[in-house]
């Protein structure tokens, strides 16, 4: 992780920030690159489930979702482009497919297996469960649709829990990435 984090310094700063945000937020790469400033309210990123033409693709499962933006990720947000995208490409639009190319270049540079931006989301999810928060928390944070009767009966919004989990996971990831905590060597990828 420290080598990967360091390698992000050698790519376009907006791409590096978006990749770090995927890792720290655990959200889908396509959603992160389309993050808009107006969807960030009081530290929460509120993602409309339905598409908004020309500005937001909607969430993969069509369910509106919100996730706490931990302090480590807030530092990555910077100023939005004039078009409103937080992680804008050179022309002010969402950078989308360039993240795959950046990840291929980093993988090649580090001599590891091919990794994708989505692998960063998997790393976040694995960190949630490894820290003992469980799969329910991971699924809730990563907007996996569960369905069933629990969705009818459980109307709790988990705001306090989500905020605590997001801060804890981001702190664990950044500490490991910056080499501040000993960790087991885990192969990066699938």
Image (tube, grey):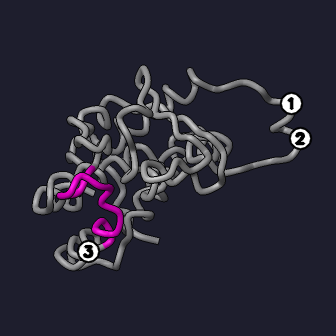
Q: Earlier in the sequence, mark 3 or mark 2?
A: 3
Left or right, residue 67 beside residue 174: right
- Magenta residues, as a range? 88-100
User: Which residue position is annotated with label 3?
Assistant: 107
Would you identify the image quadrant in which residue 97 lies? bottom left
Give me the residue at 42% from left, 58% from top: 29
- Residue 162 tag number: none
Q: CA distance from mark 3 to mark 1?
A: 44 Å
Q: Secondary structure at mark 2?
A: helix
Could you say where residue 91 lies in the image, as x and y percent from the top left?
Answer: 20, 57
Residue furthest out toward the left: 10
Image: 185 above or below 156? below
Q: How many numbered marks are there? A: 3
- Quarter of the view holding residue 25: top left
Q: Residues within 10 Å of mark 1 (few under 14, many from 20)?
A: few
**Horizontally, is 163 left or right of 43 in the view?**
right
Given contact means CB atoms under 8 Å apart, are the residues at marks 2 and 1 in contact? yes
Q: Nearer the viewer, residue 36 or 141?
A: 36
Q: Secondary structure at mark 3?
A: helix
What residue is shown at x 35% (from left), y 63% (from top)?
96
Q: Is residue 114 left or right of residue 59?
A: left
Instruction: Please give the name of the residue rendered at 33% of the width and 51% of the height, measured from the top-left corner.
Output: 183
| Disc sitting over residue 149 in the figure | 2
Indicate the position of residue 8 as horizontal and vertical percent values: 18, 58
Please report contact status of discs 3 and 1: CB closer than 8 Å, yes or no.
Answer: no
Identify the residue position indicated by label 1 in the image. Answer: 153
Q: Position of residue 82 (x, y in %)?
A: 23, 41
Asked if the stretch drawn in magenta spans residue 160, the answer is no
Report the side of 2 relative to 187 (left or right). left
- On screen, 125 above or below 136? below
């Amino acid at each position: 992780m420290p080598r990967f984090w360091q390698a992000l310094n050698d790519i376009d700063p907006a791409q590096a920030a978006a990749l770090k945000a995927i890792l720290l937020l655990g959200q889908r790469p396509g959603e992160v690159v389309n993050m808009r400033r107006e969807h960030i309210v009081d530290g929460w990123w509120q993602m409309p489930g339905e598409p908004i033409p020309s500005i937001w693709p909607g969430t993969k499962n069509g369910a509106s979702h919100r996730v706490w933006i931990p302090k480590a990720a807030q530092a990555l947000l910077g100023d939005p482009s004039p078009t409103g995208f937080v992680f804008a490409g050179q022309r002010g639009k969402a950078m989308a497919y360039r993240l795959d190319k950046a990840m291929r270049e980093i993988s090649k540079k580090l001599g590891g297996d091919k990794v994708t931006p989505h692998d960063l989301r998997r790393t976040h999810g694995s960190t949630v469960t490894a820290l003992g928060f469980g799969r329910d928390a991971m699924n809730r944070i990563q907007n996996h649709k569960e369905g069933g009767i629990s969705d009818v009966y459980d109307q709790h919004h988990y705001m306090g829990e989500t905020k605590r989990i997001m801060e804890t996971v981001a702190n664990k990831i950044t500490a490991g990435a910056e080499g501040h905590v000993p960790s087991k060597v885990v192969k990066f990828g699938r």
